[in-house]
Structure formats: C-alpha cells, structure tokens
Amino acid sequence: MSTELRFEILSRDSGTRARAGLLHTAHGTIETPCFMPVGTAGSVKGITQEQLERLGAQIILGNTYHLYLRPGHEVIREMGGLHRFMSWPHPILTDSGGYQVMSLKGLGRVTEDGVQFRSHLDGSAHFLSPERAVEIQMALGPDIMMTLDECVEYPASTETMHRAMKLTSRWARRAKEAWKKERASGVGGRVSENPNSDLGAGNSTGVPASLPTPGSRHPVLFGIVQGGMDMNLRRESAEEIMEIGFEGYAIGGLSVGEPKAETYDVAEHTAGLLPADHPRYLMGVGTPEDLLEGVKRGIDMFDCVMPTRNARNGSVFTSQGKLVIKNARFARDPLPLDPACECEVCRRYSRAYIRHLFLAREMLGATLATLHNLYFYLDTMRKIRQAILSGGFEKYYSRVRAGP
C-alpha cells in the first residue's frame, strides 16, 4: 500500500470472518469496521459538520456526480479541495458517480468509452469516462476515490452481468493508468489555498484552525468487483481487479433489489476472494442488520443513505426495530425514540414531540430523527467493533439476532 493509506488489522474473530482494524489515511485514522454517513452534495442532509463530529463520524462519503454538476469540481479545487470547501478535516471517500448516472432512467447511455448522460438538473449533456472520473475526483481531493464501474439492476441475465463485469474491469485498468498519470504529474493534487479562510478556528470540537495543506497528499484508488449474483462471475471479476492492483477493494452491485439471502451469500463469497491485508468495502448497504451480517462475512467499510433518508421520512431505527414516528400511537408517548439509546435526542426529546414536529412540518423533526439514526448506526458499529476486540463477537451477534 502507498504511504497515503495503511490498513492495520488488530483482531480477528475466531468463529467468523469478522475483523477489527485501523485504516490510516492522510486526514486521520478510521476505526474499522466503520459506517460512512453519505454527504451526497458535500453535506450530510439536515445536520452540521460539528454535529457529525459529536456523533463520532470518522469518515463521510461524497458523490462525484452531484459535486461535478454543482458547484463543479473546478470550483471545489479552487476553494482548496472538498475537505476545506465543506470544512471537514477528517477522511472523505468519493464514489465515481457511475451508479448515479446509470440510475437516471432514460438519461444515460453506456458505451465502451464511458457513459453519456444528461444532467437531472437542467438536461445538459455530459460524458463520464474512467479517466474523467479520476480527473474529477483528483480535483475534489478526497482520501479515497473509486473507479468507474457499471452496476446492473436485479434481475439481470448472465449475459448482461458478464458484459457489465468485463466492462468494469476494462474501465478499472484505464482508471488505474489515469490515476498513475495524475499522481506523476501532480496536477490532480494541486489545489489552491484560500487565504481568506480560517476553517475551524475557535471550534470546541477539536477541529484544527488550519486544515492539512491541500495537495500534500494524493487520493488512493479502490477497485470495484462486479458480477451480479453469479458466483463464477464474481470470482472472475475479483481476479481481474486484483491483478490490476488497488489500495482497497469494494463489492458493488448489491442491494439493488435482490433477496437478502443473496446479498449476504454474494458478499461472503466475494469478500473471501479479496486480499486479507486490504480494506473491503460493501457499497450502498444497508440496514443495521446488514451491517452486522456484513461484518460477520469480513466487510470493513459500509455506506448507505438509509439512516438519513429514512429519518427525513419519519422512520427511525431503534433497538426494538424500526418506528414510523408519525403514527398516531405516538401522539401522547412520553418515551424517547429508543429508551436504550444514549444519543442527545433520546436524552432530551419525546416521541410525542418529535411526531408533532413532523406533522407540523417543522425542520427540526427531520434533524432530530437524522441525529438519532446516524448515532444508532455509528453506535452499532462501535459495539460490533468492541465485541470483535474483546473476543465476544459471536455472542454479540447471537444476542442481536435473537431480537429484543
């Protein structure tokens, strides 16, 4: 691995593939297994960076597609890179934007060269190639960036899955070459300072007054394994992506409508093919149950929009299961969202009050639900990690799966 990324495994569970480690990046060390809150457009919806820090978020995810369209990667480069632009001095991972482009029904077309698409904002025409995705991400300046891949919907024919998997491999090789050229030239990592910005000054959360100098490090590149639900294609894809060689490996193309059992089987199969000394990232997954099941199968990194998206719709995750807080049964409920939760929301506010906020369409309702849901996800990962470190993961797993 490069000097910009180092993965250290501290403990392995004896009965499963679960492991706990440290992922050292240019902007800080991440305790794994970890969950990455999704900050699609440079913001985790509904809450501030200070609140994210208090929740214990160690890394967040930004979306290349959305940041490219608005405000534009060149603007972010000129502002000192994404860390400085959004005042987040901790690790950031950016995805390639491929999934978003391909999910635009009728607005995108895949070719050998890349993806032609129209902006969902104004209909303008754009083109995203493996090289362009690298160029944009280098301008954003995250700690970890992803290769462009093709993700197919479920169900898909073997022929479709095979074609997409092979295209992903060819794109990965092109992305790796573009990444090497960008690093050699230094262009991608050179972003301008903003002399008028003193981000984090006077912050009680420990954010330094001066963020790390933009351009002093270069983003590392993760490869993505595809292949749909076909185990043979997953093996072939893993072999091809590993032959190219990346700093970490992601499992893509899951949580696209397939049954949970298939998600877990493919994740376990694929994780077992990947190098044990590199971080493994399961993209876009999922529920708290999915995190537990993924860790059991050897996954180190997760991201998903569920905790924030569900929160905005009034659904909260608790130790007793998911609650739809807008339901009438909570109108006079004095209990917190989750009596077993220690987050700042559950220590102060009642279900009845939060339900009232949603029905009154007060912005605070979504904010409080978001704070709780993110705390619940991050705390779940902390508990899983501690169970692995203490040698009690299997007992913890059995207790959680048994339910309340």
Image (cartoon, rainbow, N blue to C red):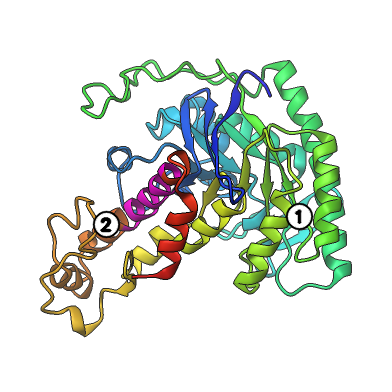
Q: Is residue 136 above or below residue 362?
A: above
Q: Which residue is mark 2?
A: 367
The range drawn in magenta is: 373-386
Q: In the rendered structure, does residue 12 fall within the stretch colored magenta?
A: no
Q: Which residue is mark 1?
A: 226
Q: Main secondary structure of the magenta part?
A: helix
The label on residue 77 is none
Query: Which amino acid type corresponds to the residue marked 2 in the rendered image?
Result: Thr
Q: Is residue 9 above or below residue 387?
A: above
Q: Secondary structure at mark 1?
A: loop
Q: Is residue 395 left or right of residue 131?
A: left
Point 83% across, 35% down: residue: 244
Tag in front: 1 or 2: 1
> Which image quarter holds the N terminus?
top right
Query: Which amino acid type corresponds to the residue marked 1 in the rendered image?
Result: Gln
Callout 1: few (<14), some (14-19), or many (20+) C-alpha neighbours within 10 Å? many
The reply to whether residue 18 is in sight is yes
The reply to whether residue 104 is in sight is no
**Measured from the top left, where is residue 178 in percent x and y?**
77, 30
Point 18% across, 78% down: residue: 330
Point 57% across, 55% down: residue: 294
Callout 2: few (<14), some (14-19), or many (20+) C-alpha neighbours within 10 Å? many
**Measured from the top left, where is residue 154 in percent x and y?**
71, 72
